[in-house]
Image: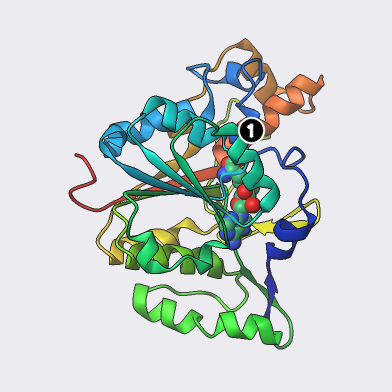
Amino acid sequence: MGYALNTTDDYHLHGLTSLGWELTLCNALFPKNSPCRGALVREASFGEHLFHFLNEKIHLTHLKTVLEIGGGMGYLMKDLLTLAPRLHATMADISPVLLQKQKGSLAGFSAVFLETDFFKIPLTDLRAFDLVILNEVLGDFPTLRAVDGPSSPEAARFAARIADFEADYNLRFDPAENINIGALEALERLCRAGVPCIYLSEHSCESSHSDPAFPGMNFSPSGNPEKISLKGHAEFTVKFSALEKMARAFGYKVFRGPYTDILPISFNDRVTAALRTPSPLSDRQEILRQFLYDLYKYEYLLLASAPAGKG
Ligand SMILES: C[S@@+](CC[C@H](N)C(=O)[O-])C[C@H]1O[C@@H](n2cnc3c(N)ncnc32)[C@H](O)[C@@H]1O
């Protein structure tokens, strides 16, 4: 067995012209008339939900500096800066197109923009931030895909780090398993820089859902990062338990769970009908079903080092 390397840099640098077709949860909840808002207990944007969640856990309004990596359209940061006006934001993105969108969304707010690959930001610069956010970004980072046969030279360079990760953080990777090597390296950089608060979220390969009332929505965890094919590139779901172990090794307090903790579902008639139907009866119901599935499939990891963490 060996590895092939999945990367998305080339796509984000040269292929991406719009995030429209890649409907992130943040974008799905952005329009005030989005049908997805009606599926939640509080009909609000993603940023508003995340603000309340973070403020309860890490006193967001007391923090001064936030770095968002891969901020997409900039909607999440717009909400955070509106609700926590003392925050100064830095937006770092590899995509020139999306960074331009972020400048538009954040016009009039206190924000600095960096066109850069996250892995090129020096550790000393990361130290300046109280909070770093990576929302739906980890799956874009390099992933080792297990293949029959030898590793490609570029994959072998990344695979050379597997043994270190296993030894340093008490991890074990099966030879047939795909490895979120970029996500591991990204978190290690943030932990080594001593960033007090780190928020990560992504499609998880370890989430599950089981509700006898809605059997069509149930799924079990694969435990192995799964490929998600998208326009012009592919991403992988993330094995959060490996990231959690790493964070604990660095002494962080860990909050981990499904997205439904941040975005609680309102089980109203529309939602229960969408959950129950074997196949969607309308476009609206299809959007709702995909949104609800994503809420169950995504996980978040919020890491806090004392004294930034509360409770
Ligand atoms: C799926 S989008 C998520 C956008 C946004 N966070 C959201 O939730 O709507 C991934 C984002 O990460 C950025 N990105 C991907 N790889 C990156 C890298 N190596 N360094 C910095 N940004 C990166 C992309 O350009 C894009 O803005």
284 to the left or right of 51:
right
**Vertical position of residue 2 compared to residue 47: above or below:** below
Pick the front one: 90 or 231: 90
The kind of residue on which mark 1 rests is Asn
Question: Which type of secondary structure does the marked residue at label 1 adopt?
Answer: helix
Q: Position of residue 200 (x, y in %)?
A: 46, 49
**Vertical position of residue 177 compared to residue 103: above or below:** below
Within the image, what quadrant is residue 210 found in? top right
Q: Which residue is mark 1?
A: 27
| Structural crowding at the residue carrying mark 1, measured as other residues with C-alpha within 10 Å and reported as few (<14), some (14–19) or many (≥20) | some
Q: Position of residue 74 (x, y in %)?
A: 57, 38
Residue drawn at (57%, 81%) of the image: 159
Q: Quadrant of the N terminus?
A: bottom right
Q: Residue reaching furthest front?
A: 108
Residue drawn at (48%, 28%) of the image: 79
Q: Is residue 98 visible?
A: yes
Q: Position of residue 98 (x, y in %)?
A: 66, 46
27 to the left or right of 119:
right
Residue drawn at (55%, 43%) of the image: 298
**Vertical position of residue 75 compared to residue 6: above or below:** above
Pick the front one: 247 or 33: 33
58 to the left or right of 234:
left
Ligand 1 is within 8 Å of the C-beta of the residue at disc 1: yes
